[in-house]
Amino acid sequence: IQLKEELGAFGYKIQVSPVEKGMAHILGNSIRRFLLSSLSGASIIKVNIDGVLHEYSTLEDVKEDVVEIVSNLKKVAIKLDKNVSKVELELSVTKSGAVTAGDFKTTQGIEIINKDQPIATLTNEREFSLTATVSVGRNVGILSALPTELEKVGDIAVDSDFNPIKRVAFEIFDNGTNETLEVFVKTNGTIEPLVAVTKALEYFCEQISVFVSLRVPSNGKTGDALLDSNIDPILLKPIDDLELTVRSSNCLRAENIKYLGDLVQYSESQLMKIPNLGKKSLNEIKQILI
């Protein structure tokens, strides 16, 4: 896996090669889904604007209404240090013209990536101040600030977008014996593309690890579960290889007994309870097990 090229602002093409034939689509789709759903990031969750009581207010000498200002704040890309999970940012200017994300006062451990992101336009010289609360989260938060966090009069919840990934697409190239997967990733600049892909795949591995650790259930009805690697190999022998009569084999398969390891966990009385498995079939099975 390698960074192939940069495509514009925070756009990157990542190449994965070689990939087993037929697997590139599965891998590409998995990377895309996990990039768009599993990564965490920082976003503004609430804002308090001086002179504003609620989100449907308007401000004198400000071109945008409060709804549009809140929408602009949602687009501010913020990077926090690992040890910072929540912080308040202050913005206070006295001027006319554009107010941007670069006007926020930041401290160590806090970085505004898109400092040119518009927030408001002041049509005449005036004071404009606000306090924004930034928090770390995952996915898109539906009004991320809970009612209990809206402590002050004028606190407005922001429908935050925590995901640092803005766009993901992939393309597959056939090399004959294998495939090459190219993934286009566009971020908001708060995370490196290779780091983002690595984190997404780590999360993917965490989710499927439960299937890797499956073991034989105590009742012996394993179905297609993965078997413990320490088990005696003879217990992995399929029932079909035991040379049973068709009737006996069909009865065992109907009970989802597929391996010798499944069969030996059944007592004689349990086997007798299997539908259509009579005394003759039971004796046949006992002879094979002996």
Image: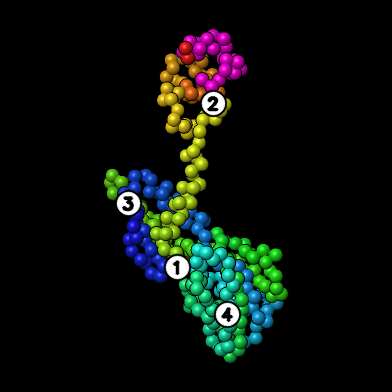
Q: Which structural element holds mark 2?
A: loop
Q: Nearer the viewer, residue 230 or 95?
A: 230
Magenta stretch: give its range. 264-288
Residue at x 65% of width, y 86% of height: 60
Could you tell me if residue 32 is visible in this image? Answer: no
Disc number for residue 17: 3
**141 lies left or right of 165:** right
Q: CA distance from mark 1 to mark 3?
A: 25 Å
In the rendered image, residue 128, in percent from the top left (x then y), is placed at 60, 84
**206 lies left or right of 173:** right
**Disc nearest the viewer among 4 and 3:** 4
**Disc nearest the viewer among 1 and 3:** 1
Q: CA distance from mark 3 to mark 2?
A: 41 Å
Q: CA distance from mark 4 to mark 3?
A: 47 Å
Disc number for residue 228: none
Disc number for residue 220: 2
Amino acid under disc 3: Ser
Residue behind mark 1: 189
Q: Is residue 79 above or below residue 21?
A: below
Residues under numbered marks 3 and 2 in contact, where contact means CB atoms less than 8 Å apart: no
Disc on the earlier residue, 4 or 3: 3
Residue at x 36% of width, y 61% of height: 13
Disc number for residue 91: 4
Could you tell me if residue 94 is visible in this image? Answer: yes
Disc on the earlier residue, 3 or 2: 3
In the rendered image, residue 252, in percent from the top left (x then y), is placed at 52, 20
